[in-house]
Image: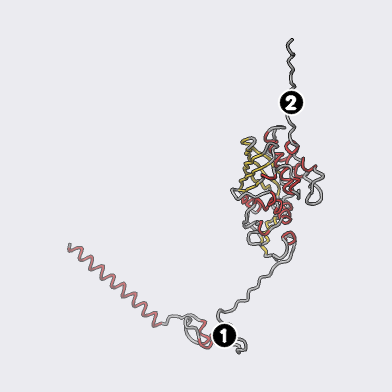
Amino acid sequence: MAAAAVEIPPQPAPALPDYLTDQDAVLKDSEAKWRYGRAPDYSKTRKVFAETKQMTHEAGSLPELVQNLVKNWEVEASFKTSLSDWRTVDRPNYSFAINGSDPQDAEHMLRVGTYNAIISPNEYYSPEYSDFGSSHKTFKRMMPTFAWEVLEVYSGPPTVAFKWRHWGVMKADYVGFNNKGEKVTAPAHGGTIDIQGVTVATVNEKVQLQSVRTWFDPMDMFRQIAPHGVMKKEAVDKSIPPTEAIDSDQKVEIEQALKPVGMELPEGHPSVDVEGLVEATGCPFAGGAGKEAVKPFLPTEEQIGEKEAEKKEALLQESEQYREERYLRKGE
């Protein structure tokens, strides 16, 4: 008797990680070490996203999954202080680079912060004179909500290429440190700051980020922040940590005592009245002597007459030469 065929029921597809299906998944990680002792509140940013986004992706679609992954990664990179708590990255194989720069590991971003990791020094901002705390004060005070969305996905795993948009409203003054270490201010204009870029990322079998390469123009953001350029610059005391200096009203007064070159006198030498010497001897390039040293040479009447005579003589010679040349041409 032939054995009855046994049908094997289809295996259910493995469940997707929550950081792909829920944009707020990692905010629920109660056991994680959060930068300020608890998970941040993204409710206002999510509200702005829902009300002003350009794209509405179908639930479960690749664009929505990529969008959720990056949003959860941004939360972890900004607020989880222990790399072991980052669930969105393949930690041993993770690296991040902006605009073709040298790749940096997760520890670098954890140390300097997301803003300092993606912005190069310029006349508006510099990571060299900013720290994690000051960078968040600079951007989050100016723009309390900074929403992010995927506009288009060009390829799927394991290499995911996509175009994105980052936007918010400038509600307060921009205050930051530039590439000279100066505190710069641009007044709030109440308008929208809207930047776009492209990212190419590789992911592992758990759809965790590995190599992340992003291209965008950071100066486009600053041109929108300060359409009329930096309105105010202040020297600051660089001995104060950036997190404190950004809130400090303390300014550095720069005083330069100008000393004539070569006028230093040996100790014990009697003082010299330099102005008196100039007044007494006169300046060889100023004419006259004594008090007249401050006046330039003025031509005498005799010199003026000589100049006029020279001009007349030159004109006469040119006239005679012209008549002679004309006569010779007629002879030809």
Q: How is the image coloured?
A: secondary structure
The residue type indicated by label 1 comes to Val
Query: How far from the left and from the top, in percent, is residue 223?
Result: 62, 52
Could you say which disc has been placed on residue 66 in the image? none
Residue at 71 percent across and 32 percent down: it is 60
Query: Which quarter of the figure is the N terminus placed in?
Result: top right
Query: How far from the left and from the top, in percent, is residue 197?
Result: 62, 44
Residue at 62 percent across and 86 percent down: it is 267
The residue type indicated by label 2 comes to Gln
Q: CA distance from mark 2 to mark 1?
A: 99 Å
The 10 Å Cα crowd at callout 1, few under 14, some 14 to 19, many 20 or more, is: few
Q: Nearer the viewer, residue 329 or 83?
A: 83
As helix, strand or loop, the secondary structure at mark 1 comes to helix
Q: Residue 212: name its quadrant.
A: top right
Query: Which quarter of the figure is the C terminus placed in?
Result: bottom left
Q: Which mark is in front, 2 or 1? A: 2
Residue at 81 percent across and 51 percent down: it is 37
Residue at 69 percent across and 58 percent down: it is 130
Residue most extreme to the left: 331
- Say how many tags the image has: 2
The residue indicated by pointer 1 is 274
Residue most extreme to the front: 1
Placement of 143 over or under 55, stated as above or below: below
Placement of 246 over or under 289, stated as above or below: above
Could you say which disc has been placed on residue 11 in the image? 2
Q: Is residue 51 left or right of residue 154?
A: right
As helix, strand or loop, the secondary structure at mark 2 comes to loop
Q: Residue 250: name its quadrant.
A: bottom right
Q: Nearer the viewer, residue 310 or 225?
A: 225
Q: Nearer the viewer, residue 214 or 304?
A: 214
Query: How far from the left and from the top, in percent, is residue 199?
Result: 63, 42
Marks 2,1: beta carbons within 8 A: no
